[in-house]
Amino acid sequence: MNQALKELVDKKQKEGGKPAIDWDNRRKSYVAAVEALYQKVLNALKDAIDSKAVVQQRRVKTLTEDHIGTYEVDELILQIGNEQVLFSPVGRNIVGASGRVDVVGDRATAVLITFPKNRWSFVASRQPTLQAVDLDDGTLAEVLKAVMGE
Amino acid sequence: MPAFPQQHSSAERQTLDEIYEWYAGMLDSLSTHRAHVRAALADGTDAGPRFLGFSAEDVDRYFEGQRAELDRLTKVNLVGSTEASIRLDLGRRIYEQLKDDLSKSYKAWYTTLSPVKQKLPDFDEEGILDRIKDAKVLDSNIVGRFRECLKSRHWIVHGRYFLKHANVDQFSPEEVRDRCQKLVNAIEAVK
């Protein structure tokens, strides 16, 4: 066999030996992680939501990603006073993470990324040093302040 | 002895081919890096803090930006190298007192310059390029097509704070290299 052909076949055979990625499962895990994030946010704001100081809404967003295809996932909209904050899923296929949701306010956008086991982090900065802070009630307040302004 | 343009002992001249070869190597590196980061999208692996949280669109936008910047800086280098070639050619023609039409045009103009200008004559408007056109020794389109590349360089090297000329990103590095090479070749051929 021609050497170039042999190398091509060997390469493809090796690639075929890799465990296949279950893209459907990845999509489901991501959509579940987004829902878990929303529940975390809503729990943190429960008192304000109960008193109608914060109003929540949902709307469907359609995402299309390589390998995964087109799917739908909810966006979460929070009306806080006169300002609106949108939690908008960006996708499952994200560098260094298992998914991303952008938090879009009137003044800025913050990036939340998720890791396995539904752990969400806020990317505070990438340069000069990486600062990714785990999302909790305190960090959520920081994120909202950052996108809405003080 | 007039202080005509000449190559300094500390010079680090780059030919058009050297610049283009560097560009090609950088493109390869950029392409490899892009593929690496693109692969990290699928497998979630670490591609460095700069890219953490990047989506596919972010990755594409980042590398397209890098490519655009590489293109711009390469074009600046190509035009700069060409300018140096033309300046050194002018100095050589004056120093060696050559008798061709271009050398005569240079000399007639050069002797009217102040000592400061003789050391660094104007290049574009009212400068060396106009003398090349006046000498009518080469196709004026060659000079005109090179001149179109100067506006981009001017905007980039002077800090990009003023109005961006429409042709800043119009020409590819290949196109600029071609325009530069044609001018350098045409001038070298004038004897």
Image (spheres, coloured by chain):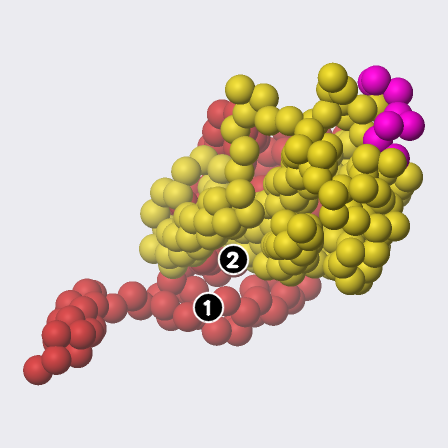
Q: Which chain is yellow?
A: B
Above or below: residue A99 compared with residue A147: below
- Which residue is at a point 52% across and 28% down the rendered structure image? B12
Question: Which one is nearer the viewer's eye here, B90 or B74?
Answer: B90
Q: Which residue is mark 1?
A: A66
Residue B102 in the image, given as x and y percentages of width and height? 77, 47
Question: Residue flagged by tag 1: what amino acid is it?
Answer: Asp
Relative side of B39 to A89, left or right:
left
Q: Which chain is red?
A: A
Q: Is residue B175 magenta?
A: no
Question: Residue flagged by tag 2: what amino acid is it?
Answer: Ala
User: Spatial distance from mark 1 to mark 2, Cα to Cα?
Assistant: 9 Å
- Which residue is at a point 48% across and 29% down the rendered structure image? A130
Q: Give the class, few, some or many, for how many residues have Cα within 10 Å of label 2's Cα (few <14, many ≥20).
A: many
Which label sits on residue B56? 2
Magenta part of the chain: B109-116
Question: Which one is nearer the viewer's eye here, B152 or A147?
Answer: B152
